[in-house]
Image (spheres, grey):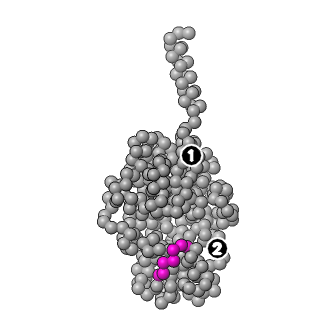
Amino acid sequence: MSARNLTRALVAGAALTLASVPAKAEEITVTHWGALMYGTPYAVALKKGFFKQAGVDITGILTSKGGGTTVRNVLEGGLPYGEVALSAAVAAMQDNTDIKIVMMGVRSAADIYWVVKPDSPYKTLKDLVGKKLAITSPKSVTDSLSTMVLNKHGLFDKIERPALGTVGAGLTALDKGAVESTSLIDPLYSARKDKYRVIFAIKDELPPIAQTVAIASTKFIKEQPDKLRAIIRGRMMGVDYIYSNPKDAAKLLSESYDKLPLAVAESAVMNNVAIKYWGRGGFEYAAMDEMLKALKIVGALKGEVDWSKMVDASFLPEELKKSN
């Protein structure tokens, strides 16, 4: 064999060997995976093989109860990537945590409703003057968004807002008559919509408010940039599939979330497709600024935020960079 042919054979053999070696398996973390709708693009991407198509082998998704827990999963668990509440990412970075925001996830809080009993005499927000409207906890999303809505209508000091801890506790209080209204979010809303009536919805009251972003440690960013790009692209492919095939996406979500009935998944996905709930990954700074405004109103955020120091958009697919 000539030297030239030998070289060609060696190159071809090396290429074949590299192609046959699977990418290292990875786990990522997503806030409220298995419970809320944030994880839908990941469920779809896993089931449809989009992560592998993009060049990364994601074998599992770890859940968390949100907030700083997801941030800690990334840092302390050595995970490459996590989708976390925007508020948690900002708080962590203000404490000099060694992470960067690399993608925007959920672009809207329009999936949050406040409900009353079906036979309730209350028809509008003004009817709740002097009554009780439950939130989950002080400085929470339900606290900040309800504050913004009440301020909009000049009702902030006219409606009591007890903090009951969880959405479930609020529903129990509503059923027992301890409060007149409480918050509800998909897929819980879709599972219980026949039991309650919406008195106001964030989609009708406020502009798009970014809920989640993706974070990565600076160590992972430096050491494995291509893998980070692949994760973001795989999720984007999942989002695109949801909007083009919502019924099948709902089926994949039902299969991925334990005990989520298909009918409930379909209703929740359709609701969120209608409000363009999931972003493809590009940064919508106006929606991110709206969340900062909401956090400041309830004292959950202090000081100013400089996105240029917190955000690294270089890992987005090229078509998403153009929107930044």
Depth order, front residue of 61/156: 61
* Residue 119 vertical position relative to residue 240 in the rendered view, above or below: below
The residue at 62%/48% (across/down) is 48
In the orientation shown, which residue stands out farthest toward the top? 2
Q: Is residue 243 magenta?
A: no
Task: Look at the magenta stretch and give its main secondary structure.
Answer: loop
- What's the amino acid at mark 1? Ile
Q: Which residue is mark 2?
A: 192
Q: Position of residue 304 (x, y in %)?
A: 31, 64
Q: Is residue 164 magenta?
A: yes
Bounds of the magenta segment: 161-167
Depth order, front residue of 240/58: 58
| Number of numbered callouts drawn | 2
Note whether residue 8 is visible: yes
* Residue 48 vertical position relative to residue 177 in the rendered view, above or below: above
**Contact check, label 1 and label 2, Cβ < 8 Å:** no
- What's the amino acid at mark 2? Arg
Query: Could you say which disc has been placed on residue 58 in the image?
Result: 1
- Badge 1 or badge 2: first in the primary sequence: 1
Depth order, front residue of 172/84: 172
